[in-house]
Amino acid sequence: MKKIVTGNKAVAEAVRIAQPDVVAAYPITPQTEIVETLADYVSNGQLASQYIAVESEHSAMAACIGASISGGRTFTATSSQGLLYMHEMTNWAAGARLPIVMANVNRSLAPGWNLWAEHTDSMQERDTGWLQVYVSTVQEAYDTILVAFRIAEHHDVLLPVMVNLDGFTLSHIMQPVDTIEPGDFIPPIHLPETIDPKNPRGYGTIAGPADYFRFRWEIERSMRNAVNVIEETQSEFAKRFGRTYGLTEEYRCSDADVVVVSLGTLGKEAEVAVDILRDEGIKAGSLRLRWFRPFPELDLAGKEVVVIDRDYSFGFGGVLAHSIRSKNLVKVYSVIAGLGGQEVTYDDIAGFIRNRRIGEESWFGVNDHV
Amino acid sequence: MYEIRIHSRGGQGGVTAARLLAMAALHDGNYATACPFYGAERRGAPVVSFVRIDDRPIRIYSQIRSPDMIIVLDASVMQTVDVLNGLKTGGRILINSARKQEFSAYVTNTVDLTGIALRENLVVSGSPILNTPVIGALAKTGIVSADAAKSAIRGMFADERNIRAAEAAYAEVSV
Amino acid sequence: MDTITEISDDEYILKCTSACAGCGDSLTLRYVLKAAGPDIVLVMPAGCTAAFQGIYPKTAYSVPVVNIAFGAAAACASGISRMFLATGRTTKVIVYAGDGGTLDIGLQALSGAFERRTDFLYICYDNEAYGNTGMQRSSATPLGAKTTTTPAGKAEPKKDIDAIIAAHNPPYQATACASYPQDLFRKVRKALTFHGPTFIHVLSPCPPGWRYSSEKTVEVGRLAVKSGMWALWERENGNLAISAPTKAAMKKPVPLEDYLLLQGRFRGIDEITVGSLKEQIQENFNRLEREEAKP
């Protein structure tokens, strides 16, 4: 059924279909519509979840951890400061191997108070063991929340999944979405360990130097398994519901001389830039990364690479740019653009590509190479 | 692609108007996106919403710079906001006013949305509802069909006064 | 008055924990578990009890234990409790947290869980400092007590967590002490008959922290109560009942000095501070008596 909803609303709708047992969340702009909508669904009986209106984001994740250890499917959502506040517990969730699903509405970090889209918040979670995916349309937000639960709960994975959507730019835009009847696409949750007083166990107990590293390796092993699980799940989704998603989304890349890589809505705006450049005779392509953790294998052979980072790692560089540099052993033109919701148009993106300086970094609006 | 910018004040339903318009475009088999622009959202402060309509998926998220149409739900915002900014030459203005308006270089459509709303008793908490009748006026301009406009309105509001107001706006908008 | 024969023989703490000799916390936990029985899940934040549970792959506790981050216990318990509610499980959820994880870093989550009327029992074992990390002060450290971060004696009075909990109007809250196991046992049993949130605050003397000889734990705990430094009471649906040992202490208190002098953490405490403590004891007694007397 087709309707026009915001990115946030689409997330809430998909969560409702996944039927989590427990939702524990704390409001923060620009995520609030998600938690309000879910509260509404619970209140009017459309969603039979336990809704815990926790008193902080740290507690939101802690409550999700408790519910998940107890065998439940859980969901939360946050942004920016909330995600940072949660950070101790996001680490705990992954370390505890719990398939929690979280929507993160990407927003810049204070100070100053800036409510608009930036990826630094989720980038700071990249080492935690959470799977991370970045979506670019309302439809994709809806579809990806659904696959996220199935991927997280797969016994070869059992890691939490963070679905990222650009604050305001995607969370608040209204686009058409085709909703689905899931059928048995998301099977009932069945975690391998349960709390059982007849077989009492200690969860997250003390692990000494001879053992701890083995647990960390298990997380990484599951991360690597996740690549196949993601592809299989998305493939099954395509078969059942007709919409295909990959680890990345490539637009006119196969014969491209230069490729622009980005995350989120910039990846869509970039396609418009690509079309403009193609009309000028520049063989450009757009590579929108969707899954950022596990970091996908990219084929960039024979192409010049422009990377747009809507984030920054101070004293180092754009996280996406440097990820590609190190994984693909390729020099890139690193553009830092869109921080704090800075407007980046298709014309700007076309400019980044036309005026690229491979091997250099440029901050849009600060030292534009125009 | 057709780009529309809607000017209103916070609390007047400008964002809902954008959504209704996008819904109507969807009913016509088109693709549409609608988005409020977030500045200081205070009741009564000027608010801008954007709608893009196209026959294929819209991949642009940046702000509309050269709209094809602007809609002014509250003419008083024109005292502080340059509503014509960027409007394409020959573009269209749909303005809520009891007096027929003219803006040279643009096609101007005037409709007394406030008067229609009051007449149809389409008032909530003392404020006339403008966002459903404006969809009726828009149907007259042809960017959405009349049937699609009605489907969109009925999809959101059960009260048939909304349809009557939209039909009145359709009939009364100056072209 | 409950007799010792009511306490079950079941032991839920297996031998060879790494607790200190004379640990008041392990004494508290022993009786809590006896009272609560096997059908529970303990939520245990960082603290002494988490530290002496044993090392993977073994555990000394034969009940399910969910270890969780220091400030997150009550929130984690909220998630478990609501999940049990959703699935119709009657297993009891019990947070077992130290004073640091309760009065300080865990206070926000605790207040949130109580405000949401979470169905759980929260037990705070109070050794009046951050024991696990080497006895730094907590807000539960008494006025005048030396800790590693208050070498001259704490300048502020002990934070009144019981009053904070009372402000949330739980159906049941109580204070207890490791040295009075029957009283503790009875109170845990009583708490578990209520739909939560319920709270028990247990004084758990600590030999290395309070600096007394290991074999004196029970004696130190008893002196805390007999001097009035620690009052035993319970409040059930708003009705206060002062426990017998404190009633006795009110009639004939043991001099505070007898309690203080036994512990190295109070060495060198000055007259004025002792006087302050005595005033607080008297005020507390008065307040308890007034409340109990209310019709």
Image (cartoon, rainbow, N blue to C red):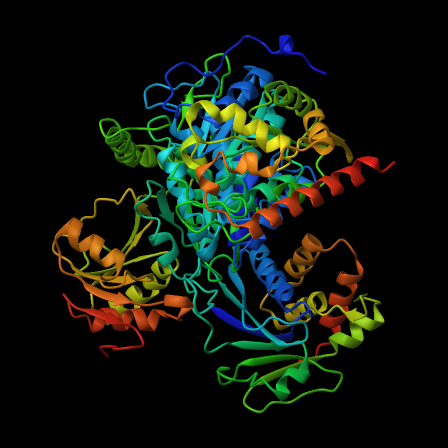
Out of A99 and B157, give the one closest to the viewer: A99
Where does residue C248 sit, x and y in percent of width and height?
71, 27
Counting every numbered tag in the picture gives 0
Q: Nearer the viewer, residue A300 or A217?
A: A217
Q: Is residue A182 among what the camera can see?
A: no
Using the rendered view, name the quadrant where residue A97 is placed: top left
Say which of C165 and A44 sits in front: C165
Single out the residue that lies furthest toward the bottom. Answer: B104
Name which quarter of the figure residue B29 lies in.
bottom right
A105 vs B119, left or right, is left
Residue at x 53% of width, y 65% of height:
B35
Q: Is C258 above or below relative to A25?
A: above
Please determine whether, in this image, residue C270 is positioned above or below residue A222: below
Rendered-image quadrant of the N terminus of chain C:
top right
Q: Is residue C137 above or below residue A159?
A: below
Position of residue B63 measured from the top left corner of the image (x, y, whole percent):
46, 71
The residue sitting at 60% across, 22% down in the picture is: C180
- Residue B65, image x and y in percent? 45, 77
Q: Which image quadrant for residue C142?
A: top right
Q: Where in the figure is residue C137, as x and y percent of width and height?
A: 46, 46
Question: Is residue A22 found left or right of B126 in the rendered image?
Answer: left
The answer to whether residue C84 is left or right of residue A216 is right
Answer yes or no: is residue C22 visible: yes
Q: In the displayed image of the protein, which residue is found farthest to the right?
A: C295
Point out the image quarter for the C terminus of chain C. top right
